[in-house]
Image (cartoon, rainbow, N blue to C red):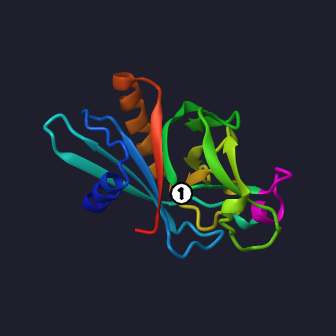
Amino acid sequence: MLKELMQAFLQKKYLINTRPYELNIAGVRSRQSRPNKFDDFIHVFYKREDGDWLINSFPATTDPGIYWLRSPMNENGTAILCPGQYKDSHRIGVHRGKYQALVQQNTLQVYRDNNRDDVIDYNPAKKYSGIFGINIHRAAVKGVTKQVDVHSAGCQVLADVEDFNLLMTLAHRHKKLYGNSFTYTLLEGM
């Protein structure tokens, strides 16, 4: 997967961080996105001090759960992050006042799905830019979560709490070396 990610980044002329332990965080949305499923991945890749690349791949969702598709918290509809690279978009902060996660700090683009059904609508005519609280966080407090449900209203959510803990360990190392700013890239179906 590392080779494919690097090729996708280069093809799109996206930034690739190359300093040791400087994270590249990439969500990959499944070609067959199904609401309420952790059918996507969040990949974290970085160089070690010896120059070798490492990658960690975590089952996740890059889409909202059915609960929020049916009951949008925004009058324009439920947020669905648009593919792209968002430089310095996140930092370590507190998600919903509960626990540390990667929280949005700069503008992102989202589609808005407002027809209150169980189908995710990627409608370019309903695109918005702003700070919406599109965070990168975990689902449940323990174990592996099987369904998205209320865990994502547009956030990028890891299914396994242990995967999330590893992501945060890596993020803290990055922060210590390079500061509290992370670029997030969302790609479609690879």
> How packed is label 1: few (under 14 Cα within 10 Å), some, or many (20 or more)?
few
Q: Which x, y percent locates residue 82? A: 58, 55
Work out which quarter of the rendered image holds the N terminus and state it: bottom left
Report helix, strand or loop for mark 1. Answer: loop
Residue 100 seen: no
Magenta segment includes 73: yes
Position of residue 53 in the picture relative to residue 185 (left or right): left
Q: Amino acid at mark 1?
A: Gly
| On screen, residue 17 above or below 153 | above
Work out which quarter of the rendered image holds the C terminus and state it: bottom left
Query: Which residue was labeled with disc 1?
Result: 143
> In front: 135, or 99?
135
> In front: 18, or 40?
18
Question: In terms of secondary structure, what is the magenta stretch mainly?
Answer: loop
Question: Which quarter of the figure has residue 35?
Answer: bottom right
> In front: 162, or 89?
89
Magenta segment includes 140: no
| On screen, residue 60 above or below 105 | below
What residue range appears in magenta?
67-77
